Image (cartoon, coloured by chain):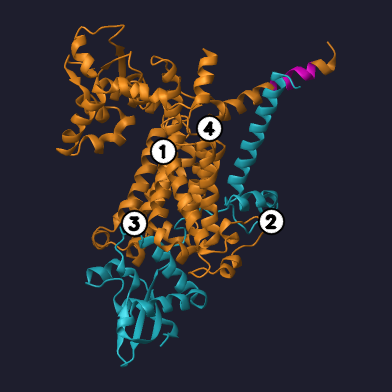
Chain colours: A orange, B cyan
């Protein structure tokens, strides 16, 4: 055997092993659910934060407000630091952009057109922060870092309106169709990037604290709570009488921050470290009132939530609620479309369906089903029409957003029953109406393809 | 036309380059500035870090210094003084608390930049007092120990604070 081949084989083997390790670290196929949880949280945080500051947009970011353009440019030290606000000239432009940004935050939160909305949210957030750097602090950096990775990630594939649209489109073709959950190696890589971001953040935060005397001598917690910014009469009183709590809190914080980047990766230790980190930030939220910061960090921690934990949580929920069967009229186009819409929100697939025209039910007879849709519960009870929907919205997490409409005392039932009964009675007409409003070109296309 | 296999490899390579690059950026961005090796390593990442605003220090509460409080005194036309603590207008759970806390902090840090704007808006806000001028004050907290609290004191009691005048601004007539 030639000498070159003798050397080539172990080298090839070494590269193959390195390549395998690289793939294991970065490109394991994963569901996007941890990213989606962060997306919802970050979208809600931005919407809340920037929505409430709406009356002060010109005051905080305008040229005649707190931070004149010249003052803001004083913070800019290279050409790469850009903000769309630097290019605005009239106050209405600030307001239009702000409203557009808020709409995009809302769309980002609910996962509507996520593929491009996420870029607007990132560009908007960077623009606000560069236009008035005074307001940008740690929480804003955390959010931008996560948003940046999310812009490259395949988000909007679960727990989102984009997913609802995709499932609905599949169900419109066949109500029994099931769209498999989206998973990809790139989703795994993006989750890993956010995880590394959080670990790096904890590491630097912990290490930098070690340089300060107050973190060594156990005084840090006392100092924080006696500061005017975070003063809490109750806590300061408690700490003064039980000073060991200050030391315990100080060293506990350091311990969590230094342990996190090393122990969060192992399967056995991750739940404990994750619980400790979330606890730490809940403490920041409740005792220091750092609401925005604490929630932003908790959204970052979501990247460490294993998709299988969420799956098992979903299974537990399904078991607890039990099987539900919805019996509908498969001959009515409007009913089929409504079912496709409803089932698109049923991410856990809790609802089974039965078309009584082709598969009659033994529990509810056809005469009753001609009048209304029925929901059969695990205990054999059958709820008709509005009551069926009312039961479902509370038990299917994807429909929780409808709970306020279905559970307003008196009002919901007062209006809900007649509205449902009217729709059910006129469903044939509604089905026909839908077809007649289709544009001529669509009808021609459909006819042609048929 | 590139083959499917080659295209797959190129995509894998692009993804690998991106995650490697971004991880390096994440690690280098918060590293200390006082090291020339780190500075030179960070140099190629700087445009990337700046454009996407990824630079940061991740140094939360590493140095806990005593805090400041902004107050202002309105001197009315009759020579009477009225003292206000602007942050007291908002409870901590108030949605605007944080935004205004930061703006007051900015006034204390750079009164020459933000003091006049703040003073003018305060003059307008208290127009019913007929303000002649407004004094911006910085209240600096001093050390406060558990023994002080047990003796019945509070961190903002006069003996634990130092008041500095930041600037005086005349209100428009």
Around disc 4, counting alpha carbons within 10 Å, would you say few (fewer than 14), some (14 to 19), or many (20 or more)? Answer: many
- Range covered by the magenta-colored residues: A6-15
Q: Position of residue A148 (x, y in %)?
A: 55, 43
Say if the magenta span includes residue A14. yes
Describe the element under mark 3 as helix, strand or loop. helix
User: Which residue is label 1 attached to?
Assistant: A110
Q: Are marks 4 and 3 on the same chain?
A: yes
Compared to A123, does B170 lie above or below?
Answer: below
Determine which of the numbered discs, if any, sits on residue B146 in the image. Answer: none
User: Which residue is label 3 attached to?
Assistant: A288
Around disc 3, counting alpha carbons within 10 Å, would you say few (fewer than 14), some (14 to 19), or many (20 or more)? Answer: some
Q: Gap in Å between the C-alphas at discs 2 and 4?
A: 38 Å
Lateral position of residue B160 relative to residue A116, left or right? left
Q: Gap in Å between the C-alphas at discs 3 and 2?
A: 37 Å
Check if mark 3's residue and mark 2's residue have beta carbons within 8 Å. no
Check if mark 4's residue and mark 1's residue have beta carbons within 8 Å. no
Q: Gap in Å between the C-alphas at discs 4 and 3?
A: 35 Å
User: Which residue is label 4 attached to?
Assistant: A154
């Amino acid at each position: 055997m030639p000498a070159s081949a003798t050397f080539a084989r172990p080298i090839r083997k070494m590269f193959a092993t390195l390549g395998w390790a690289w793939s294991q670290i970065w490109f394991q196929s994963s569901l996007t659910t941890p990213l989606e949880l962060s997306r919802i949280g970050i979208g809600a945080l931005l919407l809340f934060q920037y929505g409430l500051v709406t009356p002060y947009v010109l005051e905080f970011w305008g040229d005649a407000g707190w931070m004149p353009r010249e003052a803001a440019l004083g913070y800019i030290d290279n050409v790469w630091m850009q903000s769309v606000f630097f290019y605005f000239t009239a106050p209405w432009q600030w307001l239009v952009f702000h409203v557009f940004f808020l709409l995009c935050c809302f769309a980002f939160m609910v996962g509507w057109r996520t593929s491009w909305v996420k870029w607007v949210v990132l560009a908007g957030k960077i623009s606000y922060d560069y236009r008035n750097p005074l307001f940008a602090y740690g929480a804003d950096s955390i959010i931008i870092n996560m948003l940046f990775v999310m812009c490259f990630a395949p988000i909007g594939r679960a727990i989102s309106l984009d997913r609802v649209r995709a499932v609905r489109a599949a169900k419109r073709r066949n109500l029994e169709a099931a769209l498999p959950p989206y998973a990809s190696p790139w989703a795994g890589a993006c989750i890993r990037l956010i995880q590394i971001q959080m670990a790096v953040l904890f590491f630097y935060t912990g290490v930098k604290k070690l340089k300060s005397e107050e973190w060594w001598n156990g005084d840090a917690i006392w100092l924080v709570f006696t500061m005017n910014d975070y003063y809490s009469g109750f806590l300061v009183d408690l700490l003064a009488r039980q000073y060991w709590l200050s030391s315990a809190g100080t060293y506990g914080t350091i311990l969590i921050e230094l342990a996190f980047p090393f122990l969060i990766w192992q399967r056995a230790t991750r739940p404990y470290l994750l619980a400790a980190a979330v606890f730490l930030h809940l403490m920041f939220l409740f005792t220091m009132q750092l609401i925005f910061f604490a929630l932003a960090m908790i959204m970052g921690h979501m990247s460490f939530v294993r998709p299988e934990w969420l799956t098992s949580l979903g299974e537990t929920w399904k078991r607890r609620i039990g099987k539900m069967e919805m019996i509908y009229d498969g001959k009515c186009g409007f009913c089929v479309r409504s079912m496709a819409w409803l089932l698109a929100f049923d991410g856990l697939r809790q609802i089974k369906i039965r078309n009584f025209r082709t598969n009659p039910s033994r529990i509810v007879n056809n005469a009753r089903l001609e009048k209304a849709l029925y929901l059969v519960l695990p205990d054999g009870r059958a709820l008709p029409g509005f009551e069926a929907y009312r039961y479902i919205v509370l038990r299917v997490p994807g429909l929780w957003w409808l709970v306020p409409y279905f559970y307003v005392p008196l009002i919901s039932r007062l209006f809900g029953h007649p509205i449902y009964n009217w729709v059910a009675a006129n469903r044939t007409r509604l089905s026909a109406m839908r077809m007649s409003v289709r544009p001529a070109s669509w009808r021609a296309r459909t006819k042609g393809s048929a | 036309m590139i083959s499917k296999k080659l295209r797959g490899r190129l995509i894998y390579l692009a993804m690998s380059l991106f995650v490697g690059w971004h991880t390096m950026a994440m690690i280098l961005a918060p590293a200390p500035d006082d090291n020339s090796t780190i500075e030179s390593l960070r140099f190629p990442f700087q445009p990337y870090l700046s454009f996407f605003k990824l630079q940061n220090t991740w140094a939360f509460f590493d140095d806990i210094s005593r805090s400041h409080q902004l107050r202002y005194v309105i001197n009315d036309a009759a020579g009477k003084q009225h003292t206000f603590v602007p942050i007291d207008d908002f409870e901590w759970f108030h949605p605007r608390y944080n935004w205004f806390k930061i703006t007051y902090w900015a006034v204390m840090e750079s009164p020459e930049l933000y003091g006049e704007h703040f003073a003018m808006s305060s003059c307008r806000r208290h127009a019913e007092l007929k303000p002649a001028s407004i004094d911006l004050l910085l209240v600096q907290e001093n050390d406060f120990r558990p023994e002080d609290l047990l003796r019945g004191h509070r961190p903002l009691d006069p003996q634990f604070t130092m008041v500095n005048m930041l600037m005086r601004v005349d209100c428009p007539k």
